[in-house]
Each structure stands twice: as C-alpha cells, then as structure tokens.
Image (cartoon, rainbow, N blue to C red):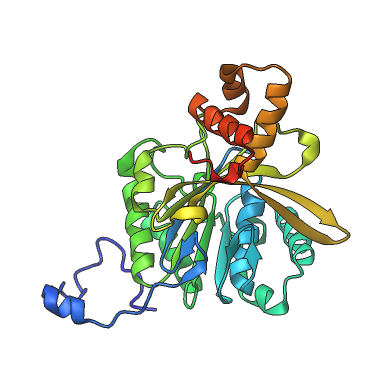
Amino acid sequence: MTSPFVPLGSQNNLPPLKAISMEEFLLSTLPERDYLLHPVIPEQGIVMLVAKRGIGKTFTALHMSLSVAGGLSLFNWHAPKARRVLYVDGEMPAISMQERLAALATGMAAPPHAMQNFSIITPGMQSRPMPDLATTYGQQALEPFLAGVDLLVLDNLATLCRTGKENESQSWTPMQTWLLDLRRRGMAVLLVHHAGKSGDQRGTSAREDIMDTVISLRRPTTYSVAEGARFEVHLTKARGIVGEDAMPFEVHLRSEGNQLIWDVNELVNVQAEQLKQLLAEGFSIRDCADEMGVSKSVVHRLKKKLEEGGDAGAVRY
C-alpha cells in the first residue's frame, strides 16, 4: 500500500506533483496488472454490480467476495489467488447477513483461509450509524480498516452514499475522488447498486466513467419465481475484456444436499432453445423478438443458425 487517503482541504502537506519524460516512463519497470477475479475485477479495478431489487445482487456480491478471499471460482470467473476483502453492508439485519454467509460458506465449501480473509462491517453490529461515504468524514471512518485490503465491497450505493442528489454528476464527485485515491493506493473496489426501470444503473451516468467493468444482472423473459436464483449476466462496460469473456451468459443456482451449484449456459444457446419453441408455436419474427426481449436482427441470426444446424453460440450481438 502507498500513502493513506488525504481529505480534500487537508492537502497542503502533500508532496509536489512530478512529471517524467516519455522515455523515462517507457523504461520504467512496472508490475503487470493481475486479477482479483478474472476477467471482471482487475487489480486496482473499480467495478459496479447492477441489478433490480430481488434478482440476487447481494448474494452474487457476497459470492464474488468470498471467491476472491479464497482464491476460488464463480460462474466463468476465477480468482488466481486468495486476497483480503472488506465487505461494507449498508442495510441488512445482522442475523440475515449471518444466515446468508453461513449458507454460502457451507454451499461453496469455503476453506478456512477464505473466511479469515473476509471481514465485514454491517449495521447490526455497530453502536453508531453507518458512515455516509459521500462525505470526507464518512470516508475517514473506514480508514482504520483499509490497511492490507485488496478488495473493498460497498453494498450498496443508495444506503452508503446518502449526501447529494443521485441524478447530479456533481454529487458523485467526492465519491469519485475517493475511489480514484483507493485505486492509487492499490485497492480494487466493487460497488453494488440498484438498476433503474431501463435495467441500467440508477442515477447519473457519470458514475460509469471511471469503471473498469459494469456487471448487469437481468431477469430472463421466461423467468418464474419458482425457479429461485436464475438471471442473465451482461458486461455493459468491459474495459480490456474481449472475445468469449465479454459475452453474456445465464446462470441458475441449484443445491445438492448442502452444496450450492451454479449452472452456467451461454445466453445465445438459451435463446436458441427459446426461439425454437416460439417458432414451433407459430410466432412471427417480430413476436419472437418482443417475447425474447431482443432485436429482430438477433432473431434472424439465431433462426439462420438453427436452420443450418450450426452452433448457436457463434451468433454475434
């Protein structure tokens, strides 16, 4: 870790900025940027996980965090090695959080070092209100807990950033300044946030400017409540993520005894099966597109692959 956070207004004692020549910069030996959770959370990455209420973003964020803490896998993602995680929860009752973590740790057979690397700040265990991280005072309240942390998780922005107006970019500026300083100090940050009616993150779009990755969880059009946790995973911003790693996919959580298992399928294969059923029922291309929530061009490409007997996974969006 480098020097700690210095609040705005207290920066008179900072060392001066320095500039180096391009030649000197290109000759500098810099460490390669590794991943905390490949390919979605790079070292010093700022990542946002977005979903509407009830889809499973907190459970997903917890699973991502425990995977990073244990050097484990989740979906198509993998943590190369165990890292230290601080999870800041803004709203959940302590007993509810305890039950979720216990079920998750048992279900994924989390090794002891994963739980040792995972620390949590949750409202029910405090003798004071949770800090408002949109303020310098709130940010300073977390400082004693940040030493040695590789991944800071903030769940969620609405409850932990209470000052300012959600739709104003200026209200986001103090938070953005702090996040960039955490990056400078070597930390990655995962922000959990609510989605608006469109499915995109709620509030000012300026939040996404500094993000490396934006992960959007969405309900499939054919979803039934009886199915439990089933959703699509889309990378709506994917800096440096290309090819198959950037493609959307669908996951469905099931249990076998005490074990939790995520079934992962390429989204286009799921959609191809859905299209096959709709066409068999006599739906038009337009009706298929409306029913599936995709464009007619995607339906045409899926239909062509089905007619050719080819791999639907080759369909491009």
Q: Is residue 87 above or below residue 162?
A: below
Left or right: residue 19 versus residue 178 is: left
Residue 301 percent across, percent down from the top left:
53, 32
Question: Which residue is painted at 60% across and 59% down in the image?
Answer: 76
Q: Can residue 245 be seen in this view?
A: yes
Residue closer to the observer: 110 or 238: 238
Residue 262 percent across, percent down from the top left:
72, 55
Residue closer to the observer: 60 or 255: 255
Residue found at the very far right of the displayed protein: 257
Residue 256 percent across, percent down from the top left:
86, 58
Question: Which residue is painted at 73% across and 22% down in the image?
Answer: 280
Q: In this view, does 211 lie above or below 287?
A: below
Left or right: residue 231 versus residue 293 is: right
Residue 270 percent across, percent down from the top left:
66, 40
Question: Which residue is painted at 27% across and 61% down in the image?
Answer: 8
Tell me the quadrant of the picture where the N terminus can be found. Answer: bottom left
Hey, which quadrant is residue 257 in on the image?
bottom right
Question: Which residue is painted at 50% across and 64% down in the image?
Answer: 152
Q: In this view, does 44 lie above or below 57?
A: below
Left or right: residue 258 versus residue 138 is: right
Q: In this view, does 149 lie above or below 311?
A: below
